[in-house]
Image (cartoon, rainbow, N blue to C red):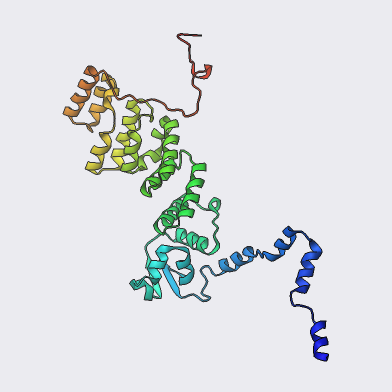
């Protein structure tokens, strides 16, 4: 009897929790709210505290002579690259210290992202952001790579577009490359005179010069290319880049008074350019491209030559 009384007197362990839920709401939505526990904020905070901490660390990365403790299982869970490196049977899988020849600040930023899922790009220098973009590409963090690309699209300027284009071309980011090209098309005259133009890679400058929509006087393009060549003395690179200049679009005075004295174009190619200019009826013209811009307006001095 006493046993039965005790059994009846003791409520079900979940009855108090159920009562609390019912007290707040008797609707299905209210009950569902009690059934779903969402504490990811606290979880993320605790995980982030392990970043570069020796607590439970089982591997140390040495980057630019600085030791950075880490945790194999966390890195492997977040990246196939690290999974293969640390658990794939490579020599690194048994090493307690692993040397990496990569930028230190970028790797620290990447580690913080791995452990916390967040990164404050506005607090980073642009060169560190580009280095981090490279690591995201190298280690297969596609979501981070796309997020950084989206950020770079928003902060494009004459000061950074050349460096961003080089990075986009190097990492095969077609969308970011297209955005850089469009920006450069709209600011062709300014970028040709900007000091960063001379820092473009051979691949980047060639891709730009090949665009019909990269519109500026060809003599100005040549002068910028000539300056680039003086800073990049590799003979094969110079020949390749110079070949993308459309000499036939220049006047005879410019060819003889600007190009010839530079010595960058041999006499045969100079004569070929003159011959093409005087004989051809289909010259490789450049033209400004303004997507989604109505050019048939007074702003561009447009005139109606026929019709109403």
Residue 28 placement, left or right of 250: right
How many callouts does the rendering have? 0
Quadrant placement of the N terminus:
bottom right
Whether residue 63 is visible: no
Residue 291's place in the image compared with 46, above or below, is: above
Whether residue 245 is visible: yes
Query: Where's residue 247, x and y in %?
Result: 27, 26
Residue at the far bottom in the pictured view: 2
- Residue found at x 81% / y 65%: 23
Query: Where's residue 21, x and y in %?
Result: 77, 66
Residue 200's place in the image compared with 76, above or below, is: above
- Residue found at x 54% / y 60%: 117
Query: Where's residue 266, x and y in %?
Result: 18, 31
Q: Quadrant of residue 188?
A: top left
Residue 57's place in the image compared with 116, above or below, is: below
Q: Quadrant of residue 181?
A: top left
Q: Quadrant of residue 50?
A: bottom right
Between 134 and 269, the one nearer to me in the picture: 134
Residue at the far left in the pictured view: 268
Residue 73 placement, left or right of 256: right
Residue 292's place in the image compared with 126, above or below, is: above
- Residue found at x 33% / y 24%: 285
Query: Where's residue 43, x and y in %?
Result: 61, 67
Between 69 and 263, the one nearer to me in the picture: 69
């Amino acid at each position: 009897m006493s046993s039965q009384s005790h059994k009846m007197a003791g409520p079900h362990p979940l009855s108090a929790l159920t009562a609390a839920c019912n007290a707040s709401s008797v609707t299905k939505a209210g009950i569902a709210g009690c059934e779903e526990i969402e504490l990811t904020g606290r979880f993320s905070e605790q995980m982030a505290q392990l970043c570069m901490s020796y607590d439970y660390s089982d591997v140390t990365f040495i980057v630019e002579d600085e030791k950075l403790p880490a945790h194999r299982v966390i890195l492997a869970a977040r990246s196939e690259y690290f999974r293969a490196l640390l658990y794939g049977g490579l020599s690194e899988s048994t090493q307690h210290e692993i040397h990496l020849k990569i930028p230190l600040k970028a790797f620290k930023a990447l580690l913080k992202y791995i452990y916390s899922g967040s990164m404050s790009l506005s607090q980073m220098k642009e060169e560190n952001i580009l280095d981090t973009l490279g690591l995201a590409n190298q280690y297969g963090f596609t979501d981070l790579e796309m997020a950084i690309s989206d950020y770079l699209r928003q902060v494009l300027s004459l000061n950074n577009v050349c460096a961003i284009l080089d990075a986009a071309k190097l990492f095969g980011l077609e969308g970011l490359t297209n955005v850089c090209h469009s920006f450069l098309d709209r600011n062709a005259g300014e970028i040709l005179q900007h000091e960063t133009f001379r820092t473009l890679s051979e691949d980047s400058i060639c891709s730009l010069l090949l665009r019909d929509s990269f519109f500026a006087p060809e003599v100005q393009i040549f002068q910028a290319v000539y300056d680039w060549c003086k800073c990049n003395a590799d003979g094969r690179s110079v020949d390749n880049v110079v070949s993308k200049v459309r000499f036939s679009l220049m006047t005879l005075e410019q060819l003889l008074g600007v190009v010839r004295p530079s010595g960058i174009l041999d006499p045969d190619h100079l004569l070929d350019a003159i011959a093409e200019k005087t004989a051809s009826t289909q010259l490789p013209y450049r033209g400004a491209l303004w997507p989604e811009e109505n050019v048939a307006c007074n702003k561009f001095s447009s005139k109606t030559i026929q019709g109403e």
